[in-house]
Amino acid sequence: MARQLDEQIAGRFPVGQRLRVLDVGMGQGTQALRLARLGHQVTGVEQDATMIAAAREALAAQPEGIRERVRLVQGDGRDTGVHFLPGSFDVVLCHGVLMYVEEPDPLVAGLARVLAPGGLLSLLVRNGDALAMRPGLAGDWAGALAAFDTTAYRNRLGLDVRADRLSALTATLAGIAAPLHAWYGVRVFTDTAADDARIPDDLETLLAAEERAGRTDPYRGMAALLHLCGVRG
């Protein structure tokens, strides 16, 4: 996903431009810190106290030049209008968040409002068109059949959450003046890997295969996650 994001940034902004980035639901700050290391000004928003504590700890371990490019805010991603002015950011990330939000449209609209014209909105969501893949590959035939007719599922943390369909999010992005510019699949081949699986020796080959599948039909449509990139009009 990081490679996909970098591809979209490189295709939209001049080389070397320091971008204003907002990462909503940043978790432990993996993407926020990565982008700060690339020279961008990053604001991270996270509601979970444990996650933001981990992000602060990771940030504290960075060199001063990187620390001064990152601002961390503990808060709800649905309150972007409270914290930020319209058009404040060149890039807005919302990765792995929408599955926990019952009504995602207001959140996505709020993200688009803080984007500057021509800005990039990056969403990572659970693929509602491929929910049957994981139970089907695991031999859970009843679970696979049930997954065809729903966007609800139970994640690996045991939480009941929701997925998004590409067609619905495409319509949402068009409706908030940030129409879909590109989309990718994420975790096409590796979704069934155990969380504690050993990193393989041929990791680069694995990543190359995932990256190729994530931009190629019909494989990307079967991915566990979808990475959607909208551009603010």
Image (cartoon, rainbow, N blue to C red):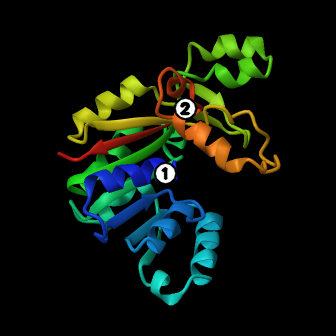
For badge 1, the amino acid type reads Arg
58 or 48, which lies in front? 58
Q: Is 71 left, or right, of 141 in this rendering?
A: left
Q: What number of labels is visible?
A: 2
* Mark 1: secondary structure: helix
Give x and y (percent) for residue 115: 25, 56
* Mark 2: secondary structure: helix
Which residue is denoted by mark 2 in the rendering? Answer: 213
Give x and y (percent) for residue 167: 37, 23
Label 2 Cα crowd, 10 Å radius (few <14 / some 14-19 / many 20+): many
Q: CA distance from mark 2 to mark 1?
A: 13 Å
For badge 2, the amino acid type reads Ala
Q: Is 162 left, or right, of 24 in this rendering?
A: right
| Residue 172 in sight in this render | yes
5 or 70, which lies in front? 5
Q: Residue at x 72, y 43 (%)?
A: 157
Which residue is denoted by mark 1 in the rendering? Answer: 3
Figure quadrant of the C terminus: top left
20 or 3, which lies in front? 3
| Residue 126 in sight in this render | no
Q: Is 178 left, or right, of 152 in this rendering?
A: left
- Note whether 182 is above or below 221 in the view shown: below
Q: Which comes sooner in the sequence, label 2 or label 1? A: 1
122 or 97, which lies in front? 122
Q: Residue at x 59, y 83 (%)?
A: 60
Q: Residue furthest bottom?
A: 64
Give x and y (percent) for residue 164: 47, 30
Q: Residue at x 39, y 50 (%)?
A: 7
